[in-house]
Image (tube, coloured by chain):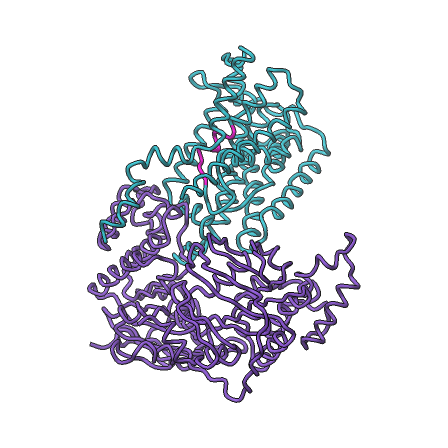
Amino acid sequence: MGPLLKLINIEKSFPGVRALKDVSFDIHAGEVHVILGQNGAGKSSLIKVLCGAYIADGGSIELEGRTIAIRGPADANAVGIAVIFQEFSLAPYLDIAQNIFLGRERAFTKAGLIDKKAMHAAAKRILEELGLDYDTRTFAGDLGVAQQQMVEIAKALSQDARILVMDEPTAAISDRESERLFEVIERLKKRGVAIVYISHRMKEIMALGDRITIMRDGALVATFLRDEASAEEMVRLMIGRSLDGIPHRTPATPGKAILTIENIKTGKLSDISLEVRAGEVVGLAGLVGSGRTEVVRAIFGADPVASGSIRLNGSALKATPDIASRAGIALLPEDRKREGLALPLPVRENATAASLWRLFKGGWFKPGAAEKVCADLISRLNIATPSSRQIVRNLSGGNQQKVVLGKWLAAGSQLFMLDEPTRGVDVGAKFEIYQLIDNLVKDGAAVLVISSELPELIHLCDRAYVMRDYRIVGHLDRDNLSEKAILDLAVQQ
Amino acid sequence: MTDSTAPTVKAPAETFRLGRLLKNLPGVSYILIAMIVVFAVGNPRFLSGVNLSNVSLQAALLMMLALPMTLIILTEGLDLSFGALLGLCGVVIASLLLAGWSVIGAIAAAMVVGLVVGLINGFLISYLSLPAFVVTLGTMGLCEGAALIITNGDPIGGFSPSIQAFYQSSVFGLPTPVLAAVAFYALLWMVLYRTRFGNYIFAIGGNKDALRLAGIRADFIHLAVYALCSVTVALSAVLMIGRMNTAHPTVAVGMEFEAIAAVILGGTSFEKGQGWLFGTVLGVLAITILRNGLNLLHVEPSLQVVCVGVLLIVALLIDGGRKRSVQGAA
């Protein structure tokens, strides 16, 4: 039997980016086909082409051998493609039954009024097919994430979906709930539903996937049958990039301990202990979702810490973002557009955001002083902007990132926590950021850096901690820092 | 696995009716009971038949505004033009009656006015995604200005007495306006909880994209909510001019705030389509009873306004406090 759905040479471009490059992909009935890839690898674009949110620029789509056109969500629904996004499409104050049949109440409507009994009975039937015993009168908003996901699946099935796309379905649910999800997936497979499963959790990928396709930079890298490749090999293909031609950083001589944390526990993290000394760059490695971002957020006081100690320069720190920033901690967040910058504001307002309290001496804002601080940063960091009045939204990714860094330089920070500092930044700006990091440690600052790009991490760091499942599972010093060593620790065997 | 996760979802099943009711019972219901007790003790006339009929008549008009306002707030919206529109429609009906139109014709004309204003609001808010607060602030000005232009700022009186006769009539001993409000509540309840349109109102507030993805013309539904609600406001103008037997151009401006207060008192939230139509009835009763009781206790009108404000804040504090304690326990 041929594939149920086939994508052939799909192309999709946006101004400046080729999001999908010649992607060919197929899926059989009753199969779980996993797509593995880092953020920005093109997984989301592919899904959006499938569900009609994007229209492909080139290539064709075949359903059971016949070419079809997907020009909008309605077309995708009509051929039985349903997508369960990470952001659920449930209305919180409608109940389970109302959500399952949202938009299709007509089947239960008599003389303009909805026959609630019939609707709840039908919803109950669908949930039972999935082995779920939910009260269909419960508001969707009162359900946990895993239950909402089940309702989404029920919703898709009630529309006779033959192809179900799940975007990182286990990202926000517990292990036990995940097992339940896997049971449901097994049931769906038996019913002949084709499942496209997006994830980067190697364990479940190896357990669930009949076939595994790896994407990188918008292109399809390889497709394996489950037993054809090891987890390490797949992760290497997923990440596989090299930084040929960049000179290695000269290792610095570390000074006294700036940050010492012991046995930190938060809602998610457990037993996190690490140390960062003046004049060194320490890496925090691990796959996406291993808890790296949570660690820096906890240190910065952005998330509450349940137990354990954080010491800065030897004295205990009970951080809130306000206290942390004044104590000299800088956080360069992963999502700079949402958490690092005020996009509609000019460079000056952004660059002085963390040091404003210094510019308000005597209670009055000193525009001249702010201007001076900003001009100084622009020349020191080589920020390409026409003036300090330029709106930050109009700068390139690399220059935006420099503004975020500059914000903390102006605040006189001594510990820089950089979460994916080169994401969405072009190659030239990348090297400049490496140079800036180098200068920071030469001036005696301590740097803690998170990166999903292993070559970058290896290039930058004097040593690194490796995380998996919200724990630190290993420490690698400079001599032992290699892609293989990191992956061995980061990927569950 | 089936057994291990089932109980957590099954629990709400058994306690469903009572549990959800108690959980959703807004703080205002307790305040309402307390107020009735205090006013009944404070002035025996409070519970007299005459006074109760008075209270229900006063509540009727506010109900006519607060119920559609509930639907609009459920869509995460707001309509500040209700009061001004009510005044404008009263003026339209009165002046057309004076010009010799039939009662039915004059009311139909007012409904057209309501429809147009509602369509403007709905189009700008839904299709152009403009903020409801600003849009309806604008149409509020339009309506108020139009009413002033039509009347030169003077009240219109001396039109057909049939409107007042309707307002003062009663069926089976119950005032017609009160029956109209009750019937309106029943109608909106059916629409909200028993029709597709009602489902979509909750969905627009909760997750408009979900509705869009379900293949429904969500923007059109959103527009229709504003349009239909404004039409019902236009109809309510009959009650307003019937009560005073004159149409005053700006007398109703500001009533929208009482309507919004009633909706919020009733436990409807500005977010995610969370709300309860009957809660609005409680909110309307709370505001009306507070005013009436304070009147009977000879509290100055200006102080009454203060009391309504305090009522709103206290009710919100009760609801907010309970919500926090629920979240803390979870």
Q: State which quarter of the image contains the N terminus of chain A.
A: bottom left
Image location of residue B115, percent across then percent down: 54, 43
Question: Viewed as shown, does residue A348 lie left or right of A448?
Answer: right
The one of B141 and A126 positioned closer to us in this rendering: A126
The one of A463 and B296 positioned closer to us in this rendering: A463
Q: State which quarter of the image contains the C terminus of chain A.
A: bottom left
Residue extending furthest toward the bottom: A245
Residue A71 falls within the magenta-colored stretch? no
| Colour chain A is painted in | purple
Residue extending furthest toward the top: B44
What is the quadrant of residue B291 in the picture?
top right
Question: Viewed as shown, does residue A304 lie left or right of A367?
Answer: left
Q: How many marks?
A: 0
Question: Viewed as shown, does residue A13 lie left or right of A439?
Answer: left
Image location of residue B3, percent across then percent down: 22, 49
- Chain that appears cyan: B
Which residue is drawn at the image coordinates 49% and 49% (left, top)?
A: B222
Residue B279 falls within the magenta-colored stretch? yes
Image location of residue A345, percent across then percent down: 67, 62
Q: Which residues are magenta?
A: B275-284
Q: Is residue A469 above or below residue A140?
A: below
The one of A182 and A195 positioned closer to us in this rendering: A182
Q: Is residue B253 above or below residue B40?
A: below
Which residue is drawn at the image coordinates 65% and 67% (left, top)?
A: A392
Which residue is drawn at the image coordinates 36% and 57% (left, top)?
A: A173
Q: Is residue B321 above or below residue A252?
A: above
Main secondary structure along the magenta-highlighted residues: helix
Image location of residue B232, percent across then percent down: 51, 37
Q: Is residue A70 above or below residue B67?
A: below
